[in-house]
Image (spheres, coloured by chain):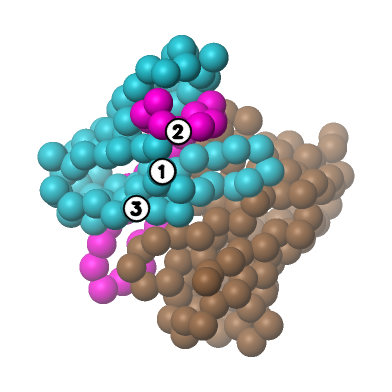
Amino acid sequence: AQTVTQSQPEMSVQEAETVTLSCTYDTSESNYYLFWYKQPPSRQMILVIRQEAYKQQNATENRFSVNFQKAAKSFSLKISDSQLGDTAMYFCAFAPAGNQFYFGTGTSLTVIP
Amino acid sequence: DGGITQSPKYLFRKEGQNVTLSCEQNLNHDAMYWYRQDPGQGLRLIYYSQIVNDFQKGDIAEGYSVSREKKESFPLTVTSAQKNPTAFYLCASSKTGTGFYEQYFGPGTRLTVT
């Protein structure tokens, strides 16, 4: 069975600081993708970043980067220079072959001015 | 602009009534998905379809039904057999093929059954 675990239900960070959100997953697949989605108060799901499992280099998108540890099955999201607009629920998602996604339970992030 | 639309944004029904949630996309995606979101439980897959006239059950299909008669449309019916239908419902779509493709989401429908 594929499972995704986000062990931090809630987190907060001061504006301009850096925060890291954790995600672990369990799978026997060797080829898959990992994603972080953001859900702001509007509830619109927005893709933040994605990582291909066969790539060793960690993905980055502006202030967002990941730390992908394949052997440990860990996929954390680092947000640098946090902004008020980063306040949202963040979901980690795992996608093996076949396009079915498995989502974690989410981490609610609050950026404090 | 290409995207996914879900209507209505809020829906209220009486217990025992079936209700259909609309999902339309103009992204020319082959695959479409329905998720249910409850507090503290993330997104759970109800049904998905990778091609017209074909669909598969997800993890929580009981009490729900879908159809996929057109590529652009994937309506979800919440039947009276669904024991706890009050939830936020998200529709998504994606490309299919040999690669891996992210899912694009609609704005969601909040269903309240009393």
Residue carrying label 2: B82
Give me the chain letter of mark 3. B
Q: Residue at x 51, y 83 (%)?
A: A28
When the figure is inspected, residue A54 is found, relative to residue B108, above or below; the finding is: below
From the image, state the color of chain A.
brown
Give me the chain letter of mark 2. B
Asked if labels 1 and 3 share a chain, the reply is yes
Evaluate if marks 2 and 1 touch, with contact meaning CB atoms under 8 Å apart: yes
- Identify the element where label 1 is drawn: loop
Evaluate if marks 1 and 3 touch, with contact meaning CB atoms under 8 Å apart: no
Residue carrying label 1: B62
How far across and how far down the image is residue A46, in percent?
Answer: 51, 45
Q: Nearer the viewer, mark 1 or mark 3?
A: 1
Q: Residues within 10 Å of mark 2 (few under 14, many from 20)?
A: some
From the image, state the color of chain B.
cyan
Precedes in sequence: disc 1 or disc 3? 3
Q: Is residue B107 visible?
A: no
Q: Residues within 10 Å of mark 1 (few under 14, many from 20)?
A: some
Q: Residue at x 46, y 12 (%)?
A: B14
Residues in magenta, as a range? B78-107
Magenta stretch secondary structure, dominant: loop
Give me the chain letter of mark 1. B
Q: Is residue B59 visible?
A: yes
Q: CA distance from mark 1 to mark 3?
A: 9 Å
Q: Residue at x 30, y 48 (%)?
A: B32
When the figure is inspected, residue A80 is found, relative to residue A111, above or below; the finding is: below
Residue type at the position of mark 2: Gln
